[in-house]
Image (tube, helix red, strand yellow):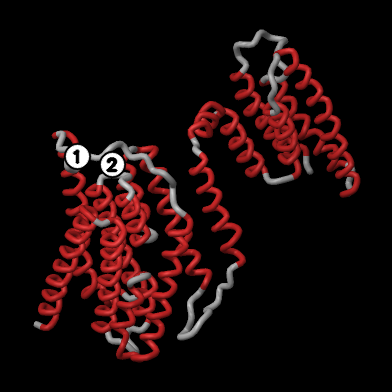
Amino acid sequence: MDIDHLLSRLAVALGIGLLVGLERGWKTRGVQGGRRAAGIRTFALIGLLGGVVAALAQATGTAEGAGLVLGFGFAVFATVFAVLERDADRAAGSFSATTTIAALLTFVLGAYALIGDLRVAAAVAVAATGILAARQDIHASVARITWPELRSALVLLAMTFIVLPVLPDVQVGPSGGVNPREVWLIAIVLAAVSFLGYGAVKLLGAERGVLLAALAGGLVSSTAVALSNARRAASGEGAPRLLAAGVSIATAVSFLRVIAIVAVMQSALLTLIAPALAAAMLVAILHGLVSVYWHDGAKRGGKRRDATPPIEFRNPFSFWPVVGFAVFLGIVILLGHAIGETFGAGGALLGAAALGLADVDAITISMARLVPEPLGELAAAEAILAAVAANMFSKLVIAASIGRGRFAGEVATMTVGCWLAALATLWAALAFAGS
């Protein structure tokens, strides 16, 4: 390593120490000089020390020698600093390992700046300093976390990083089968959407939280949003009209998602699909806006018939209902495959409607791939629109069977309005194409 390269890397090691030391020094700025165990100067020297030790390790010229120098240097530094920090804590009557861990990390990053990627070393230093600086905010956030929230987060993480990787990514069962990995992924999406809605409402309040969660959830699964909001409405965890507005927003986003998929996969279908879905999307958005305005007006006017107590979610999501719904979707997929095998190509419309109860995106992609052979543009467009209509029907069934009451009525109004708008627009588009 030439001298310029060595000096530039030592400068980065020094900068890492200065950055971490600035935060540590600022935290103890009120302590009298000489009574701090480590401040900005000490941490700057720690970062530089790590760089020098790594430079000495490189100078040995062998991997074994470098490992011995680095290991010995780190062990000596860790021992000396740990003893010093222990005595400082005893003198101050406190107990904390944060400064010791920060010092060890600074030494390691200083060494890595000499032998590794400078960008990684600098990025980790910035992240570590941010964590140290956010001490109060992190502690306050942890204090606000309830056990159901922590438990739900752990379950969601386990579903994603423990169960999902071990599930087989193959079709299982008759009639083309169902992919267990895909079904479990549906369960994860449903749980994530529910958890997102919980967090958004807790952080932003009912109005903004429900709508933001619906907007984000609609990008993944509007059906999951419908199920989550239906459960909230049934348990009294929010105004039914506001929760129904969330379903409308998620549904509008799902229409936009289908249009985007068609535009990428088979743009020739846009002339038939885009106008109908755009009209339905407009109806869904208008219904959502009117519902939100009605909810806000009732709240300001003190109309108790639509007012509800402050939202207090009992759980971010319930595990078994989530899994049960995913299993139900898997059964629907099996039925859809069976219908397709029974009726052949002529059953594309019926098969698309059956599969659309569970998943619109998969049907949209598969139908777009069948154009121009064996399906014509009109047949493919009708199949995609049938899948969208069936998916809306599944949300209506969820609203009626789980949410019930006013929530179901609002979702039904939105659904019928979207159907009528889409049919009228499709009829006009076909009439215009025929002329």
Determine the residue positioned at 64% across, 11% down.
31
Q: Which residue is mark 1?
A: 296
Residue 101 locus on image (x, y percent): 71, 31
| Up-down relation of residue 389 to residue 295 (above or below) | below
Q: Which residue is mark 2?
A: 207
Residue 27 locus on image (x, y percent): 60, 19
Nearer-N-terminus badge (2/1): 2
Residue 68 locus on image (x, y percent): 89, 42
Determine the residue positioned at 80% across, 38% down.
54
Which residue is more in the foreground, 283 or 292? Answer: 292
Amino acid beneath label 2: Glu
- Neighbours of disc 1 within 10 Å: few (<14), some (14-19), many (20+): some
Determine the residue positioned at 72% across, 28% down.
100
Q: Quadrant of the N terminus?
A: top right
Is residue 326 at all visible to an observer of this figure? yes
Helix, strand or loop at disc 1? helix
Is residue 215 at all visible to an observer of this figure? no
Q: CA distance from mark 2 to mark 1?
A: 9 Å
Marks 2,1: beta carbons within 8 A: yes
Q: Is residue 406 left or right of residue 361?
A: left
Disc sitting over residue 211 in the figure: none
- Neighbours of disc 2 within 10 Å: few (<14), some (14-19), many (20+): some
